[in-house]
Image: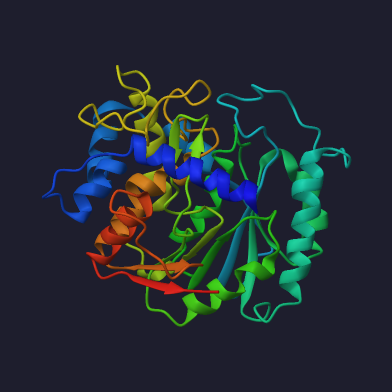
């Protein structure tokens, strides 16, 4: 307990010394836009049309085959791939033997996956939900075993590079208009942790459901920069039939956009006009800012910060789940910025114990 109190105090002290100072007349949206500059979908699409060809990146999101197609209308969307999460090109940090049952990868993901599936199959959601797994191309040897569990399998045409595009595949379900409710989940979590979020989302009328951190939470990376994830990739509820966004197209465009940004004088920024802040600061192992590289750790949540989240916030379509009923920490804190931005567009917050 004492260790946690000391750690928390260090985080608060660091943040207060390095926080952004906003002009007094800034609106909640302007403050959010300073923390995480907003890219509109049209702005992104127009930029990419002028500057690049999308074919090479598009191929990473192509599905080779669909097995055991489900007729159910509610989906748990997960992904399985076997790559080092910090790769920025194929096998940069070595190859993992996915058949070796003694590896950390096998224990963390394969063992956890079947625990996740077993827990789901015993839950009240089994009758109305199904699991769709986006499976990396090289993992085809797992297909016979997965089919025994009555999963819907989207066998991908290619492998992931690092954490991405594998972690992004689970968001492709949000484009599926045949689905009423979709949940993006992490397979290394117990399925039962999602019950309260699913129940809450089912009775809501919102398009996007996301987890809102405890009121004091954010990460300091390498004692230098702050990562505040507005949306966690493994806790997302979504109604595809209410969707006005093509997730696949936007993801591809943003990958290309970040590739082009990497060649500029300010590769850690999303626009040359952005301020250099603790939220986009380049680091030794994240030279494009935390999550700024399109194939490595953090990119799956970065795209939500700049594009998807603000889009749905400004549509008033977001339901936020919080494990604390304290939403305002202090004015310049990332959670306060997030909360005030959402509330300015009449989005909903609920406290779930």
Quarter of the figure with residue 225: top left
**Which residue is at the front of the view, 182 or 296?**
296
Residue at horizontal 23%, vertical 38%? 46
Residue 33: horizontal and vertical position, in percent?
25, 45
**Residue 79 visible in the displayed image:** yes
Q: Which quadrant: the N terminus?
A: bottom right
Q: Which quadrant: the C terminus?
A: bottom right
Residue at horizontal 78%, vertical 65%? 149
**Residue 71 visible in the displayed image:** no
Residue 92: horizontal and vertical position, in percent?
64, 21
Residue 223: horizontal and vertical position, in percent?
50, 30
Q: How many marks?
A: 0
The vertical placement of 140 against 175, above or below, is: above
Residue at horizontal 47%, vertical 24%? 283
> In screen coordinates, is 186 left or right of 348?
right
**Which residue is at the front of the view, 128 or 84?**
84
Residue at horizontal 22%, vertical 64%? 344
The vertical placement of 181 against 229, above or below, is: below
> In screen coordinates, is 227 left or right of 144?
left
Quarter of the figure with residue 186: bottom right
Residue 16: horizontal and vertical position, in percent?
36, 41
Q: Residue furthest left?
A: 25
The vertical placement of 149 against 226, above or below, is: below
How are the residues colored? rainbow
């Amino acid at each position: 307990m004492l260790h946690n109190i000391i750690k928390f105090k260090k985080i608060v002290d660091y943040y207060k010394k390095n926080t952004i100072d906003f002009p007094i007349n800034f609106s909640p949206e302007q403050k959010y836009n300073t923390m995480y500059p907003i890219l509109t979908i049209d702005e992104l699409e127009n930029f990419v049309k002028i500057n690049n060809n999308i074919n090479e990146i598009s191929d990473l999101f192509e599905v080779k085959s669909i097995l055991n197609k489900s007729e159910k209308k509610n989906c748990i969307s997960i992904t399985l791939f076997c790559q080092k999460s910090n790769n920025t090109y194929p096998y940069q940090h070595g190859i993992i033997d996915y058949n070796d049952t003694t590896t950390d990868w096998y224990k963390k993901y394969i063992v956890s996956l079947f625990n996740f599936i077993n827990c789901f199959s015993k839950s009240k959601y089994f009758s109305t939900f199904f699991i769709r797994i986006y499976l990396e191309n090289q993992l085809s040897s797992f297909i016979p075993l997965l089919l025994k569990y009555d999963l819907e399998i989207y066998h991908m045409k290619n492998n992931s590079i690092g954490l991405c595009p594998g972690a992004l595949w689970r968001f492709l379900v949000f484009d599926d208009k045949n689905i009423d409710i979709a949940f993006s989940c992490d397979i290394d979590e117990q399925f039962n942790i999602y019950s309260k979020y699913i129940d809450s989302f089912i009775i809501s009328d919102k398009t996007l459901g996301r987890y809102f951190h405890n009121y004091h939470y954010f990460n300091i990376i390498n004692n230098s920069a702050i990562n505040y994830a507005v949306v966690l990739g493994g806790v997302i509820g979504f109604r595809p039939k209410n969707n006005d966004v093509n997730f696949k197209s936007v993801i591809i465009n943003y990958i290309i956009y970040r590739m082009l940004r990497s060649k500029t004088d300010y590769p850690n920024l999303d626009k040359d006009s952005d301020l250099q802040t603790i939220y986009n600061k380049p680091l030794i192992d994240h030279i494009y800012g935390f999550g700024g590289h399109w194939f490595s750790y953090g990119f799956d949540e970065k795209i939500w910060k700049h594009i998807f989240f603000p889009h749905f916030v400004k549509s008033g379509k977001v339901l936020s789940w919080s494990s604390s009923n304290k939403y305002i920490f202090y004015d310049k804190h990332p959670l306060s910025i997030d909360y005030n931005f959402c509330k300015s567009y009449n989005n909903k917050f609920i406290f779930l114990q």
